[in-house]
Amino acid sequence: MKLTFLSDETLQDLRTNYEEYKEHYYTKDDAWFNDYLSLNGRVLESKVDFQVPEMNMSDDFLVSDAENVKNLYEALRHLNLSQATDERIWAGLAHLQLRDYAFHRLKKEREAHNDKRINTGYFLKAGGMKRSLFVHILARLWWVGHMTYDETNKENPFWLTEFFCEADFSARSVVFFSSNFTSNRAITRGILRALVSWKQKGNTIKRDHFVQATKYLNVVGGAMILDTLTMEEVEKMVGNVWSRCLG
């Protein structure tokens, strides 16, 4: 099948008139959404092939978020970066082909009438584009997968993904990927490889390790062009500074 998405007009209507529609989100009103989205022109079909993944619907988000990063990224690994930043696609998936997952993942927020979180979960409304992508309940799955997927590891290209998702997934996603240079996959994977090595030496990895790694590279970035570094070079640099400061 093909990936469907919301038209510009539909996206803007749902975004701007949320107050009018919010009860349908609260009550998981499939009938209303089906009727609303069935009107001509509200849903468009892309040229992107899409096999709807079987999403893990466990209430243990420590498990299900990690699994769903893999599930969604595998299903849409062929998206280009322009498509992967298109709100019409992510809002579309949340309202269309992955609506059941969206209802499930935001169950507590819907029941609590947490309008702010419902909005940032369904739409890219968490501030800037980068933060919004890593807060949206579906976009963040794809983007974490994209940034951590290590094709050099033929046996398990998701080994860094599994490490990243093993704790504090939501917080880590926002904190770690808020820096400009972590848009570079080589830098991201280099930092994560250094963190894995640090963990293998018996250290407990906390959120602050991610923060300090990005702060260190931010300082280094004032003296050199980080984008020229390889994954291995970043791994060595970060590993060395931890060994000196924390070893």
Image: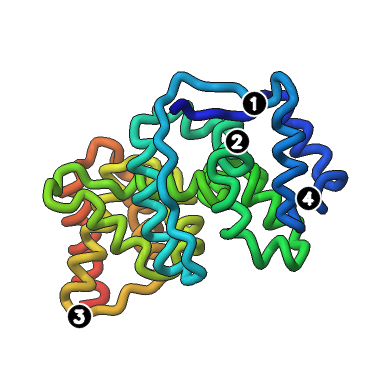
Decide if residue 121 is in sight here.
yes
| Quadrant assignment for the N terminus | top left
First-in-chain label (1 vs 2):
1
Quarter location, residue 56? bottom left
First-in-chain label (3 vs 4):
4
Q: Nearer the viewer, residue 133 or 224?
A: 133
SS at circle 3: loop
Q: Nearer the viewer, residue 30 or 182?
A: 30
Pointer 1 residue = 43
Pointer 4 residue = 24
Comparing marks 1 and 3, which lies closer to the viewer? 1
Pointers 3 and 4 in contact (CB under 8 A)?
A: no
Q: CA distance from mark 4 to mark 2?
A: 16 Å
Pointer 3 residue = 202
Q: Which mark is residue 92?
A: 2
Q: CA distance from mark 2 to mark 3?
A: 43 Å
Rendered residue at 55%/31% (across/down): 86
Comparing marks 2 and 3, which lies closer to the viewer? 2
First-in-chain label (2 vs 3):
2
Q: Amino acid at mark 1?
A: Val
Q: Is 193 left, or right, of 85 in this rendering? A: left
Q: CA distance from mark 1 to mark 3?
A: 51 Å
Comparing marks 3 and 4, which lies closer to the viewer? 4
Q: Amino acid at mark 2?
A: Gly
